[in-house]
Amino acid sequence: MKIELKTLAPYIIMLIGFAASWGMWQQKVQALETKVDAISQMQIDIAVIKSQLVDINKKLDKLAE
């Protein structure tokens, strides 16, 4: 059985296209994961700052009395 290049060409092109698409999706998913991690860290930082502000306000209220 002889396989000709013109028979395989469409399949090769589809495989290359699929590989390129897969690579682009992987990059987008990784970028999204990085952004989500950054947002999660920001939420933690905001919670810590809020807690510290509450403590500072309590101390200031005690000093004002």
Image (cartoon, rainbow, N blue to C red):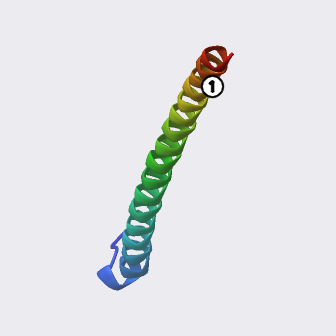
Residue 14 figure quarter: bottom left
Q: From the viewer's perspective, is 48 left or right of 21?
A: right
Q: Quadrant of the C terminus?
A: top right
Q: Position of residue 28 (x, y in %)?
A: 46, 59
- Viewer-side residue, 38 vs 34: 38
Residue 9 position (above or below residue 21): below
Q: Residue at x 49, y 36 (%)?
A: 41
- Viewer-side residue, 47 vs 12: 47
Q: Residue at x 44, y 67 (%)?
A: 21
Q: Position of residue 61 (x, y in %)?
A: 66, 20
Q: Which residue is mark 1?
A: 57
- State the residue lying farthest toward the bottom: 6
Q: From the viewer's perspective, is 65 left or right of 48?
A: right
Q: Residue at x 50, y 53 (%)?
A: 32
Amino acid, disc 1: Asn
Q: Secondary structure at mark 1?
A: helix
Question: Badge 1: few (under 14), some or many (20 or more) residues near its Cα, within 10 Å?
Answer: few
Q: Quadrant of the N terminus?
A: bottom left
Q: Residue at x 42, y 80 (%)?
A: 10
